[in-house]
Image (tube, coloured by chain):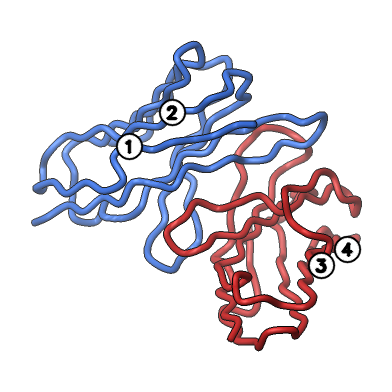
Chain colours: A blue, B red
Amino acid sequence: KQEVTQIPAALSVPEGENLVLNCSFTDSAIYNLQWFRQDPGKGLTSLLLIQSSQREQTSGRLNASLDKSSGRSTLYIAASQPGDSATYLCAGYNSGGSNYKLTFGKGTLLTVNP
Amino acid sequence: ETGVTQSPTHLIKTRGQQVTLRCSSQSGHNTVSWYQQALGQGPQFIFQYYREEENGRGNFPPRFSGLQFPNYSSELNVNALELDDSALYLCASSLELSGDTQYFGPGTRLTVL
């Protein structure tokens, strides 16, 4: 059974700082890994999808890496801004036959202070 | 291109009642997954529908049931509501059965009193 853990649970940083969010998973048979952003009371916004054959993906100030052998993924945010404040969730895809379901961590609550 | 939409936005029910939540998938997407997100937790997989058939289920009791229509929109039905069913219900659509990006709707906030 896949379990996903995110550390830290909460993080507060000053504006402009670079930061790293961590995600670990127990089943290395993970297929793909996706990072999401969630604003309070809202749905999930997809940030990056790292396919199993890839080691990292980049979009703007965001860079996500995936190391299946160690069971870890990181999300790097460069030059953080107050608008980045949100909960960040990582989720791994596992295939049970043809069923690709996402297993989520509990998220990291990020606060970027002006 | 229309994104994933869900209705209603908010819903208040009493224990023992039944509820139906609705989801319209993103244009061209034939796979819909439903997730339950309790306060302070990550979303938990309920089930997935592909081309109108259930294609996988998480650890939820049979009183959670679903349906997918020929236009690939979907419903989540919950019978005999319990207080612990209070949560944000999210649906996500994806293109075919693959590990590609799942796109989430804004969610339905269900409160059971």
User: Which residue corresponds to mark 3?
Assistant: B63
Query: Looking at the picture, which amino acid does disc 3 mark?
Result: Arg
Query: Percent position (x, y) of residue A25?
Result: 50, 28
Residue at the image point whose x is 18% and y is 43% from the top: A80
User: Which residue corresponds to mark 4?
Assistant: B69
- Mark-to-mark CA distance, 2 and 3: 32 Å
Please give the chain letter of the residue carrying mark 1: A
Query: Looking at the picture, which amino acid does disc 1 mark?
Result: Ile
Quick one: label 4 or label 3, which is nearer the N terminus?
3
Query: Looking at the picture, which amino acid does disc 4 mark?
Result: Phe
Alpha-carbon neighbours of circle 3 within 10 Å: few (<14), some, or many (≥20)? Answer: few
Residue at the image point whose x is 78% and y is 64% from the top: B64
Query: Looking at the picture, which amino acid does disc 2 mark?
Result: Ser
Alpha-carbon neighbours of circle 1 within 10 Å: few (<14), some, or many (≥20)? Answer: some
Picture quadrant of residue A28: top right
Element class at badge 2: strand
> Are marks 2 and 3 in one subunit?
no
User: Which residue corresponds to mark 2?
Assistant: A24
In the picture, the quarter occupied by the C terminus of chain A is bottom left
The label shown at residue A7 is 1
Quick one: label 1 or label 2, which is nearer the N terminus?
1
- Mark-to-mark CA distance, 1 and 4: 40 Å
Query: Which residue, as the protein is rendered here, is positioned at the far top?
Result: A69
Element class at badge 1: strand
Query: Percent position (x, y) of residue B8?
Result: 63, 80
User: In the shown orientation, is residue A39 left or right of residue A91?
Assistant: left
Element class at badge 3: loop
- Mark-to-mark CA distance, 1 and 3: 34 Å
User: In the shown orientation, is residue B85 left or right of residue A69?
Assistant: right
Asked if the residue under mark 2 is in contact with the one under mark 1, i.e. CB atoms within 8 Å, the reply is: yes
Please give the chain letter of the residue carrying mark 4: B
Give the vertical position of A27 relative to A45 (above or below): above
